[in-house]
Image (spheres, coloured by chain):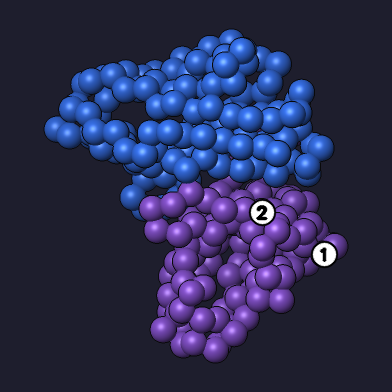
Amino acid sequence: AQKVTQAQTEISVVEKEDVTLDCVYETRDTTYYLFWYKQPPSGELVFLIRRNSFDEQNEISGRYSWNFQKSTSSFNFTITASQVVDSAVYFCALSDGGTGGFKTIFGAGTRLFVKA
Amino acid sequence: GAVVSQHPSRVICKSGTSVKIECRSLDFQATTMFWYRQFPKKSLMLMATSNEGSKATYEQGVEKDKFLINHASLTLSTLTVTSAHPEDSSFYICSAREPPSIGANVLTFGAGSRLTVL
């Protein structure tokens, strides 16, 4: 069975601090996809990044960076120089590669508070 | 990018009535859509996979007679909460898988529908 664990329920930082959101996943599939989504207070989910299981390259997009390590089944997300607008709930998600119909399951989410 | 429209955004109904929520892919065809339910301060729970032209596939524990899903066209899926009760109050979110040209398996989400059953 697939599982996504986000052990950090809430994180509070002061603006300009760096913050890392952890994500650990479990799957028996060899082909799978990992995602991060952001849910601001408005409620709509915003796609941030997708990684397939064969691509372990880390990625940087502006203040966001992601570290994918298959050896530890982790896909961590770092926000550099956090801003108040980064305050939201962040979900890590895992999708099968087709064996289960490409269903996507979500972790419990990490609520990030960035204080001015 | 791909856009999914969900309507209504908020609905309040009396106990015992039925409520329909629509999910439309505006600029792409979605053969598969997914319906999620989110309780306050909780994660998204997958309810069912909506397949165009065929029956929906429900997750374990989800009552298919309570949550009717219809995917009549390549751009529209509907979720009907039948005989709603206060415990059905929740945030319902639909999503569609974007075309492969955009990104494999990336889900585009609707804005969600907040259902309150009195």
The subunit carrying tag 2 is B
Circle 1 packing at 10 Å, graded few (<14), some (14-19), many (20+), is few
Secondary structure state at the residue bearing disc 2:
strand
Hue used for the chain lettered B: purple
Q: Quadrant of residue A114?
A: top left
Is B94 above or below relative to B66? above
Residue B53 sits above or below residue B96 on the image:
below
Relative placement, left or right, of A8 versus B51 is: left
Residue A46's x, y, as percent? Answer: 47, 41
User: The chain coloured blue carries which letter?
Assistant: A
Q: Which residue is depicted at the point 59% across and 29% down? A: A25
* Quadrant of image for the N terminus of chain A: top right
Quarter of the view holding residue A116: top left
Q: What amino acid is found at the position of numbered circle 2 in the picture?
A: Phe
The image shows residue A20, relative to residue B1, as above or below, that is above
Which residue lies at the image location 69% right of the left edge and 48% below the top edge?
B28
Name the residue nearer the viewer: A115 or A9: A9
Q: Is residue A24 left or right of residue B79?
A: left
* Residue underneath mark 2: B34
Spatial CA span between label 2 and label 1: 13 Å
Residue A42 percent coordinates (x, y):
36, 53
Asked if residue B67 can be seen in this view, the reply is yes
Q: Which residue is mark 1?
A: B55
Residue A113: quarter of image? top left
Q: Along the line of sight, which residue is nearer the eye, B80 or A19?
A: A19
